[in-house]
Amino acid sequence: MKQWYLLYCKRSEQKRAKLHLENQGVACYYPETAVEKIVRGKRQIKSEPLFPSYVFAHFDPETGPTFTTIRSTRGVIDFVGKGATPQVLDDSLIETLKEIEQLQLHSQCDSLPAKGDVVRVAGGQFSGIEAIYQEADGETRSILLVKMLSKPVEVSVENRHLEI
């Protein structure tokens, strides 16, 4: 009977391990999450592993491939388990992770507004002021245009204080 197991892989070789395992007929699950990052001054959404260095494998060790075959697969270090026995995972755990991943894909939208959008500052020293969003200022702050003394002025505000 096929069951889920958790494999510990070499650093940054989860995708390689997944590819080689799938070539052996092993179903694999490698959950990823979208992370917003500032790369060279531009906001980008990058895909990163939810569990770095780990891959879920679904197979029946009695009908093949064996635990030894899986352990010797390129990129795999060993099974996660109790002592020398690999730990069997509950199917509901994998189903829940897949549901969460699908929900994230459907609800994925930029958390920051587009340039030129009107936003309201909800906290901090500019609390209650409406401003025009300009650009991201690092990973946790944004540059806004605020009207002061009839003149637009750029200010940097923490993203957690913005209301779209």
Image: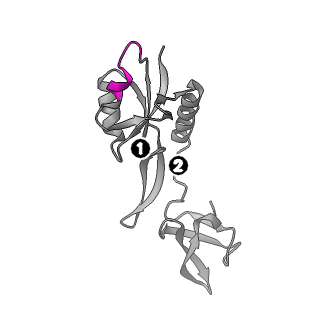
- Check if mark 2's residue and mark 1's residue have beta carbons within 8 Å: no
Q: Secondary structure at mark 1?
A: loop
- Crowd around label 2: few <14 · some 14–19 · many ≥20 (10 Å): few
Q: In the image, is 118 to the left or to the right of 39?
A: right
Residue, x 46% and y 31% (percent of image)? Answer: 84
The amino acid marked with disc number 2 is Cys
User: Dot 2: what SS?
Assistant: loop
Total label count?
2
Would you say 43 lies left or right of 98 here? left
Region of the chain picked out in magenta, as a range: 62-70
Which quadrant of the rendered structure holds the C terminus?
Answer: bottom right
Quarter assignment of residue 131? bottom right
N-terminal of the two: label 2 or label 1?
A: 1
Residue 18 x/y as whole percent: 35, 33
Tell me what residue is drawn at x 49 percent, y 25 percent. Answer: 4
Identify the disc placed on residue 109: 2
Residue 49, how many percent across, how many down?
44, 45
The span from disc 2 to disc 1 (Cα, nearest Å) is 27 Å
Q: Quadrant of residue 118?
A: bottom right
**Location of residue 116 with respect to 11 vertically, above or below:** below
Badge nearest the viewer, 2 or 1: 1
Q: Nearer the viewer, residue 79 or 164?
A: 79
- Identify the residue at the far right of this view: 128
Q: Residue furthest bottom?
A: 149
Indicate whether residue 7 is drawn in magenta. no
Could you tell me which residue is drawn at 67 percent across and 78 percent down? 125
Along the line of sight, which residue is nearer the eye, 131 or 70? 70
